[in-house]
Amino acid sequence: FLSWSNDSQYICTRNDSMPTVLWVWNIRQLELTAILVQKDPIRVVAWDPTCTRLVFCTGSTHLYMWTPSGAFCVHVPLPQFSITDLKWNSDGSCLLLKDKDTFCCAAVPLLPESSEYSSDE
C-alpha cells in the first residue's frame, strides 16, 4: 500500500509482510517521519483531502490518526462497533466509519498545529 498526502509532502506505506506497521515518509526532506505500530493489522488508510492528516483502522473500536504534530487514537463509543472501513467527505470535516453491518458518521475537527503536540521534542 502506498498513498500520497493532499499536499504531496508525505507518503504513507504499508507492506503485507508487516501488516501492523505504517510508515510515513517526508518526501521533501527525503526521510522517515513516523513509524506507527499497531497490535492488529492495519486495514484501511486514508489521507484527509484538505490537510496533512492521516486516519487508519485495524478492525477494532478505535480510529487512529496521525498529523505532523503527533499521533493519537479515538475510541468509538458504539457497542460492538468495529471499524472495518472509512471514507473522508470532500471537505475533510467528517468521516464515514463502517462496521460489517452498520455505519456511523464522525465529525472530525482539525487540531491546531502546536508545539504542544510536537513529536520533535
Image (cartoon, rainbow, N blue to C red):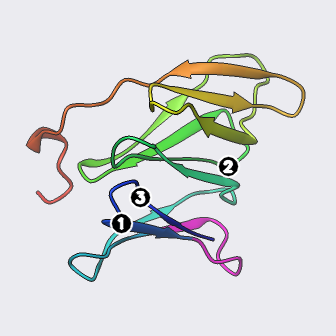
Left or right: where does residue 75 sit relative to residue 92? right
Contact (Cβ within 8 Å) of mark 3 with mark 1: yes
The magenta stretch is 14-23
Q: For the residues carrying marks 1 and 2, which lies nearer the camera in this image?
A: 1
User: Is there a contact, CB below 8 Å, between mark 1 and mark 2?
Assistant: no
Residue 17 part of the magenta segment? yes
Please report whichever mark, 1 or 2, sits nearer to the chain's N-terminal start.
Answer: 1
Main secondary structure found in the magenta portion = loop
Residue highlighted by disc 1: 10
Numbered disc 2: secondary structure: loop
**Mark 3 belongs to which amino acid?**
Ser
The residues tagged by marks 1 and 2 sit, at their Cα atoms, a distance apart of 21 Å
Tell me the distance, in whole angstroms, between the alpha carbons under discs 3 and 1.
5 Å
Residue identified by numbered label 3: 5
Return the x and y of residue 71 as percentages of the image width and height.
36, 47
Comes first in the chain, label 3 or label 1: 3
Residue 30 vertical position relative to residue 110 in the rendered view, above or below: below
- The quadrant of the picture occupied by the C terminus is bottom left
Identify the residue shown where x is 51% and y is 43%. 64
Under mark 2, the amino acid is Thr
Q: Return the residue nearer the eye: 106 or 117.
A: 106
Is 40 above or below relative to 28?
above
Q: What element carries label 3?
A: loop
Q: Residues within 10 Å of mark 3 (few under 14, many from 20)?
A: many
Q: In this view, does 46 lie to the left or right of 92?
A: right
Residue 27 as seen in the image, left or right of residue 5: left
Q: Position of residue 107 (x, y in %)?
A: 49, 19
Q: Does the magenta stretch include residue 74?
A: no
Which residue is disc 2 drawn over? 58
**59, 29: nearer the viewer:** 29
Q: Give me the residue at 59% from left, 71% from top.
A: 14
Q: Is label 2 in contact with label 3 (beta carbons under 8 Å)?
A: no
